[in-house]
Image: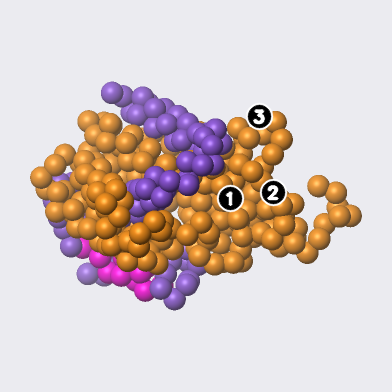
Chain colours: A purple, B orange
Amino acid sequence: MTLWEIVIIASLACLALKVSGYLVPKTVLDRPATSRIANLLTVALLAALIGVQTFGHGQHIEFDARVPALLVAAGLFAVRVPFIVVVIAAAVTAALIRAFL
Amino acid sequence: MRRIARSADDSAAIRAGLAVGLAAAAYGVSYGALAVAAGLDIWQTCVMSLLMFTGGSQFALVGVIATGGVAAGPAAIASAAILGIRNGIYGIRISPIIGGHWWRKLAAAWVTIDETTAVASTQGTLRSQRIGFWVTAAATFIGWNITSLIGGLIGDALGDVRQYGLDAAAAAAFLGLLWPRLRQLQPIAVATAAAVVAVVLTPVLMPGLPVLVASGVAIVVGLCNLFGRPGVTSEPPRLSPAPASHAHGVQS
């Protein structure tokens, strides 16, 4: 599989999922299990990505500047600081720690 | 839209849309830089922003490729797609307010993401919902694609993106998407378990797979409705945690 194939297949899959929302009947969401699983899938995948992005380094677990950066982000989200400010603050935190430690 | 008929509702929808679009655009730079650092070329980086156009999935794919390379392709595609399911759910809810011919719905589907859904669903009237949707769509689409390109171009020049904390920015961005969904015990339990499973499996499985296996937690908990109240969905139909003026708490 080439990088181009990965990019195109994933892009078309995401586009198809968007279009499918306009094609399926609204009653799909009436079944509690369906919408529950769909919503929880998003939650699980995001949490898993956060875990891997924060602690993973290739196939190793590593505690580095990303951990305090994520804690800063969590604290700022908790006090309702706007998204983009939090993302920049997390990047700056990690960058400063790496520059000075 | 006719200038004479613009109401306070319409102006509020336009302001919200532009603010959300601007925030998303600022964040496109880090996507572009990380994509190039992961090994994508500038064309692949831009095609993803044009065609996929959903930031969460784009970051997920780039993250898996960064650790696992092309060999992790199937896991990268699956991660992007699973994270893209929510856009389909947004489409079910947004479809009634779009109206018009199939080509308009197709265009709307393309730009049905966290940002557009959050702005549209927090407006008071049908008219301002439509205005909010399309203004946000235009601002986010134009901004996101331009800044992805800029990020990709400067990413080459930056060298090690970790030096600028861009890897931490990606984790913080995922946290920002997750945060408004953590208001009940069930999603909090699923998030905690999924994060632990993914991290614990990282040294054991090939890159990309830990994240997919961890998402299985959602299927088990969802099917059995563990930690939830009977018949109650884990997520309220309201998408944005705050009024439109704070809608930039939700990102794609």
Q: Which of these two is toward me, B73 or B99?
A: B99
Q: Earlier in the sequence, mark 3 or mark 1?
A: 3
**Can the viewer see residue B30?**
yes
Tell us which disc is closer to us: 1 or 2. Answer: 2
Instruction: Count residues near mark 2 (Cα–Cα under 10 Å), then give few for <14, some for 14-19, many for 20+.
Output: many
- Location of residue A10 (image quadrant): top left
Q: Tell me the crowding category of disc 3: few under 14, some 14 to 19, or many 20 or more residues within 10 angstroms, Cα based.
A: few
- Is B50 situated left or right of B188 in this image? right
Disc 1 residue type (three-letter):
Thr
Position in image of residue A21 (x %, y %): 52, 38
Q: Residue A4's spot in the image, x, y percent?
A: 37, 26
Find disc 3 in the rendering and name its residue: B103
Q: CA distance from mark 3 to mark 1?
A: 18 Å
Of all residues, the one furthest to the right in this rendering is: B4
- The disc, 1 or 2, on the residue closer to the chain's N-terminal end is 1
Part of the protein shown in magenta: A64-76
The verdict on residue A69 being magenta is yes
Nearer to me, B38 or A81: A81
Q: In percent of the image, x 10 and y 45: which residue is there?
A: B204
Badge 3 marks a residue whose secondary structure is helix
Does the stretch in magenta take in A74? yes
